[in-house]
Amino acid sequence: MQKFNPEQALCEIRREFGEHGGVTPSVSRSATFTVMEPHTMPEIFEGTRSPDRGGCYLYSRHFNPTRIVLSRYLAAMEGTEFALCTASGMAAISCTLLQLCKAGDHIVSSNIVYGGTHALLRDLLPEMGVTTTFVDPADTEAFEAAIRPETRVIYTESVGNPTLRAADIPALSALARDRGIRLVVDNTFAPMILSPARLGADVVVYSMTKFISGGSDMIAGAICASKEFLNRLMDLHTGRLMLLGPTMDPRIAFDLIQRLPHLGIRMREHSRRALAVATRLKALGVKVNYPGLPDHPQHDLFSAMLNEGYGYGGILTIDCGTRERAEKLMAILQNEERFGLMAVSLGYFDTLMSCSGSSTSSEISSEEQAEMGLSPGLIRLSIGYTGGLDDRLAQIERAVKALGTTAGE
Ligand SMILES: *Cc1c(COP(=O)(O)O)cnc(C)c1O
């Protein structure tokens, strides 16, 4: 496969200028759009006129000029035909799955997925007649064994939340293709680092709330795929995105357009620092899990799949054994060392830390958590890039040593 450079791809597409030659695009906040001739409106409804056929807009839940700019940029970055922007990552995931599956259909999913996605698959979709079998994302044969005649989707995160197990996307893609099934990959943890569509995924979904935003100040999502699939999502009669309605506001689209140009720089720095922190923690004897460490079980697979130059991502986990020790370490890191903030989510410029088992993965039962290798003492750290790296390393070293001297070691 040809090497892919998402930043280069972003630079090569047509840049959108604003009114009056603005270096930024203009924000089109209008909910509805004027047509100059009465016959134009029926043509839009018939589908013979659209933003890319005659430049006609109708109504902003359908298409919006600012959102389309962001969609074009995302599609270039992912190497897909097009993209649609949604109000949240969950909107992107739920609309995609509801579009691909109807009552009686079946999904084979990684068992290491975001808590909300797990709840959607295990609790909500069965109420609509869509069932899911969960398997270890690193075990391609387990996906194959779980496929039934009614399986429509293979679902995985490129880097599983929170245990950071990677799926073999090219192998899953070959399997899906062979069986006529769609492969959907959530790439929230690894924008620019991995390009799942280039590795064979049919649909790539994002929570742009995380790294792509980078500011922890908005909720947003995206679906990157073929025009054929995205047109189905926007169909006036059955389009799940069109009719369930979780569209992105154009003001949010504008904010994200302004952040994509420095996403590459940010991802590189998140990765550089996460690797430094992981290396230091390992030297201190802490149980640390990071795909960039050679002892990570899928380090080689990860290395074979990634786009060069962006590192292995900003997320690492440490296992403190018990929830009490995890909470103690986070308290030291936040309140004594000012290393980071105890908060869910990820991809912020400051370090965020949470104890996954009792927070973002608490929808998953303790038995299932044990099965997926999620220890109750697991802290997920999203490593930020504020402050000096040497100072940050000194802070985490002091915190680990302070924890070591407290009871319960
Ligand atoms: C946060 C997250 C989501 C959900 O995204 P929202 O923007 O909060 O709806 C989905 N998948 C992963 C991997 C996430 O981290």
Image (cartoon, rainbow, N blue to C red):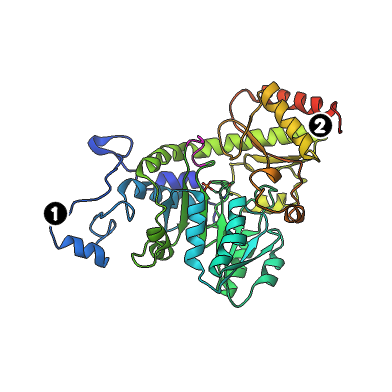
Quadrant holding the N terminus: bottom right
Q: Position of residue 407 (x, y in %)?
A: 86, 29
Whole-percent x, y for residue 130 in the image? 56, 68
Residue 224 is labelled as none
Residue 291 in view of the camera: no
Residue depicted at 32% across the width and 35% down the height:
23
Is 325 situated above or below 371?
above
Residue 320 is inside the magenta segment = no
Q: What's the residue at 56%, 35% (across, down)?
A: 348
Q: Nearer the viewer, mark 1 or mark 2?
A: 1
Name the magenta segment's main secondary structure. Answer: loop
Q: Is mark 1 within 8 Å of ligand 1?
A: no
Percent position (x, y) of residue 233?
41, 62
Tell me if I can see residue 253 in this picture.
yes
Q: Position of residue 11 (x, y in %)?
A: 42, 43
Q: Would you say 166 lies left or right of 221 here? A: right
Quadrant in the picture for residue 133? bottom right
The reply to whether the magenta stretch includes residue 216 is yes
Residue on which disc 1 sits: 36
Label 2, on which residue? 284
Q: What is the distance, in whole Å, between disc 1 and disc 2 at their CAs? A: 70 Å
Check disc 1 and report its element: helix, strand or loop.
loop
In the image, the segment drawn in magenta is 212-217
Q: In the image, what residue type sits under mark 1?
A: Met
Q: Earlier in the sequence, mark 1 or mark 2?
A: 1
Q: Label 1 crowding class (10 Å Cα cut-off): few <14, some 14-19, many 20+? A: few
Q: Nearer the viewer, residue 315 or 150?
A: 150
- Quarter holding residue 292: top right
Residue type highlighted by circle 2: Leu
Query: For this view, does 272 lie left or right of residue 294?
Result: left
Q: Is residue 104 above or below residue 301?
A: below
